[in-house]
Amino acid sequence: MKGTFRNRQLSPLHIIIILALLQLFITLLTNGFALSSDEAMWHYIGRNWFRNGLVPYNGGVDNKSPLFFAVFGLSDWLFGVNYWFPRVFGTICQSVGIYYLYKIANQMAGRQAGMLAISFYGLSVLWHGVDGRYVSYTETYDAMFIIISFYYFLNAQNKNGFLLSGFLAAIGFGFRLSAFFSIAAMFIASLYKKRGFTLSFSFGVLAGLLFLALIGILAGINLHDVYIYGFADNFGRGSTTDHDFWWRMVQMYNLFFYSEIMLFYPLVMVYLFIKKKIDWLVLWLILVFIGINALGNYARVDLKDLLPAMSLIGAFTLSHLIEKYNLSFKRVMLIIWVCFSPKIVEPLLNFQRLFTGEFQFAKNYCHEPFIPPDESASRQLGQWVKANTSPQEKVFVAGGGPQVQAYSERVSPSIYFTATQTRIAKVRFYQDMKQNKAAMILVPLYPEYTQYVDDDLRLYVDELVAKDYYFERCMFNYNIYRIRK
C-alpha cells in the first residue's frame, strides 16, 4: 500500500541529525557571531556566579531562574565569553525533545506518525516567526522536559511512572514558569485515570520543586530573591508585562496571525473535526495558549511552547488521512518539508561574512543619525572596554547594553545592569550606584535610550557624569566617561 511506512526508507535518527545540523547552521551563523542581548544578560549573570562567586540576584538581575543561569555560567567557565556553547548545548537538548516527541507519536499512532511529528516539530522550531535562531533560550529546556514528562505520563502503568513524570515536569518549570500550564494539562488529564495516579503526579511535581529549592539553598541562593526577581517584580508599572490593552491586541495579532504558525491551523481544525472532543492533546494546546496570553509579552519565542502539541496534532491528523485515503507517505513528507522549512537567507549572508570581517566599524558611528550598535559592534565595544580597564574596576553601561557588559568582562556597580524600571529596581539601583563607584560609564547617544529609559534614571546618570567624570571619547554611539582621580 502507498501509505505503508517502510523501515528502510527513512530513519528517525537520520532526520533528527539533519534537523540538528540545520539548527546549528541557522543559530551559529547569525547576529554578527556574538551573544544576543538576552544571551548577554544571562551570560553576565552566569559568569558572575561561576567566576566571581556572585550568586544570581546578587551578581545581576533578570527574570530567569538560577538553573538557567547555570548553563551560561558553565559556558563561561569552560570557554570564556562565547556565543556558540549555549546554542550548541541548546541544539542537543532540542534534539532530545524531538526524539521523545517521536516516541510519543510512534507509541500512539505508529512510526509513520512519529516521522511526521519530528518533521513538523524539528522544522517549526527553526522558523523566524518563533525566533528559531535562539535555541539557547529557556523555551528549549522547558519544552524538552515537558515533552519527556508527557512521554512518561502517557506510558505510566503505576504510581512510580506518574511520580517520575511529575518530577521531570517540575524541572521544566524550574527553567521557565510558563511550564505551569503544561503541568496543569497533565494534572487535569490524570484526574480521568485514577485518584492515586493524580496524587503520585502531584507528589512528583512537589518533589521536583523541593529538589530545585534544596540545590538553590546549597548554592547560597536566597529563595525569597528567586520569588521577588523571578516572579513578583515582573508585574506592574515598569515591568516586562507593563503594556496597555491595545499593545497586547496588536502583538497578539502579529504573533498568531502574521507568522508561520498559521500553517498548523488547518491541521488543528481537521483534528478537532475527527476527534469531536477535547482530549489531552487539545487540552495541552489550549492551556499553553492561555498561558501565552496571560503573560502577555507576545515574544515570538513564546510560540515554541505551542509547537510540541501542534506537531503531534498535525502528525496524528495526517497519519489518519494517509491511511484513510491511501495517500503517498513520501509525497506528504515532501510537502511538509517544502512548506515548513525555514528561510535561511540570514545565515547564508552571514556565512559569506566569515571571509569579509566585521559587520560594523567604528567609523560608521558617532555621527548622525545615531543608531544602536548591532551585536558585532557591541562585542567590539565591550572588548575595547576590557582592554582599557583593569579587572577590579567596575563599568556601568547606561540604558542596558548587556552585550557591552558581557564582553567587557567587568562587573557593573549595580545588580540592575540593564534598564529595569520597577519601583524595587529603581530603589536598589540608586543604592548600588551610591555604594559602588564605576571607573567608566558609557552613555548611549541613540534615541532609543530616551524612549525606553525613564527620565529620572537618565537625569541621575547625567548628573553623576557631570559631577565625577570626564569625557574620554565616543565609540559606537556611546559617550565614554572616566572617573576623575
Image (cartoon, helix red, strand yellow):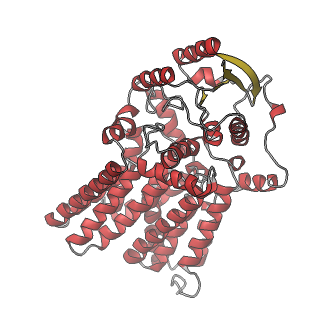
In terms of depth relative to the viewer, which is nearer, 390 or 168?
390
Residue positioned most to the front: 485
Indicate whether 450 appears above or below 198.
Answer: above
Residue positioned most to the left: 195
Residue displayed at 43% across by 42% down: 56
The image position of residue 215, as x and y in percent, is 34, 54
Q: Which quarter of the image is occupied by the C terminus?
A: top right
Residue displayed at 58% across by 43% down: 40
Q: Residue 195's image quarter?
A: bottom left
Residue displayed at 64% across by 67% down: 21
- Could one spot residue 265 in this view of the protein? no
The image position of residue 223, as x and y in percent, is 31, 42
Q: Residue 85's image quarter?
A: bottom right
Residue displayed at 52% across by 55% down: 74
* 426 left or right of 84 in image: left
Q: How many marks?
A: 0
In terms of depth relative to the viewer, which is nearer, 245 or 63?
63
In terms of depth relative to the viewer, which is nearer, 75 or 170?
75
